[in-house]
Amino acid sequence: MRCTVGLGCLVATFFCFSWLAETGLSADASQELRRAVVQGSFGTFDEAPRDKSGNVDIPRLLDQLAELRANTYNWLISKDNDWSDLAKFLPLARQRGVNVWVSLVSPSESPDGKNASKPFQQDYERWATEIAKLSARESNLVAWSMDNLSDNASVLTPERMSQIAAATRAIHPKLAFVPRLYFAKEAANPKFVKEYRNAVDGILFAYGRESGKVDRKNADQVREEVKKIHELWGPLVPLVLDVYSSDPDARLNPSTQDYVRQVMTAGKQYANGVQIHCHPNPKTSTEKYGIVKDLFHDWATEEDVLY
C-alpha cells in the first residue's frame, strides 16, 4: 500500500491492518474480495426515473432494472436528495438481487462547487468514510466511483487517493474503489497506473476508441484497448466496460443502436463486466433499452445454465 505522506494516512493504514488482524483477513484476501464484487457486473449508470418532486422513483427504477435483468446499478449523487434516497434504495435493491455502486461528482465537473454531490460537497474524505459506513450496513453497496481523476490530479493526488482508500478499507475492506478511466490519459498511461495503482480496486473503462479515430460508431478497438489496460494493471484487476448509450460529448454523433450492441458484445467477451452509460429510458430510447434488455437476458441465462 502506497502511503507516504501525512499522519492521516499512517493512522488509516494502522486501523486498516488492525481490523484485518481482528477478522483474520489478510490484506491480499480483502483485496480479492473487493475485486470479486466487481467481476460479472452488468448494469446501468445514472438517469434514473424521477418523480414530480425530483426524487428518484425507486419502485420504477427497480422494475426497470428487473426488466433489463441488470445485476448492478451505479447511483450518481447529483441532486439534493440523492444521498438520502440511496439509503432507501439499497435494502429494496438487495431484495431484488441488485448490487449498487455510488458515483460522486468530481471537482472539475463542479469548479464552483454548486453542482457538487450533496451533502458533503467536495469533502471526499468525508464522502469515502460515509459510503464505507453505509456499505458496512448494506451488503449490496459494493463499490464507489469517480470520474476524471487525471483532470483533478492537483486536488485528487495519488497520495490523497491512497489515504482515502486506506480509510475506507479500515471501515469496510470489502468496498471497492472503481474509478471511471479513459484510455490515453489514465487507463493506458503508465505514469497514471504507477501513481494510482494502490488506490484502485477495479476499472470502469470509458471506451471511446481512443487508439484510433475517436467515434461512437464501432467496437473494433475494444479487444486491443482492454488487452493494453490489462497488461499495465495486471490481469487480476477487473475491468468493466463503460458503453456510451447516451453521449455526453456534443462534438460526436450520438451512438447508434448497432454501436451499443457491438460494444456490449465485445465487452462481454473481453472485459469483466459491462455498464451502460446512461440508464436507458424505455420510452424515449426504446431501441437501446431493448438491446440492453436482450443482451442482459442472454447473459443472465448463460449464468443460470452454468450454475
Image (tube, grey):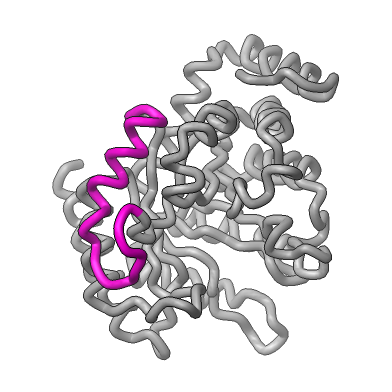
The magenta span reads 211-235
Does the stretch in magenta take in 205?
no
Does the stretch in magenta take in 232?
yes
The C terminus: image quadrant: top left
Give the x, y percent position of residue 102.
60, 53
Residue visible at 66% across and 41% down in the picture: 137
Residue visible at 52% across and 23% down in the picture: 30
Question: Is residue 229 toward the left or the right of residue 217 in the image?
Answer: right
Question: Is residue 274 toward the left or the right of residue 46 in the image?
Answer: left
Give the x, y percent position of residue 94.
50, 53
Give the x, y percent position of residue 267.
27, 53
Give the x, y percent position of residue 53.
72, 85
In this view, 216 is above or below 148:
below
The N terminus: image quadrant: top right
Q: Nearer the viewer, residue 279 or 164?
A: 164
Q: Nearer the viewer, residue 54 or 306?
A: 54
Residue furthest to the left in view is 305
Residue visible at 58% across and 61% down in the picture: 75
Residue 70 can be seen, yes or no? yes
Question: Is residue 138 toward the left or the right of residue 60 in the image?
Answer: right
Residue visible at 40% across and 68% down in the picture: 244
Image-quadrant location for residue 26? top right
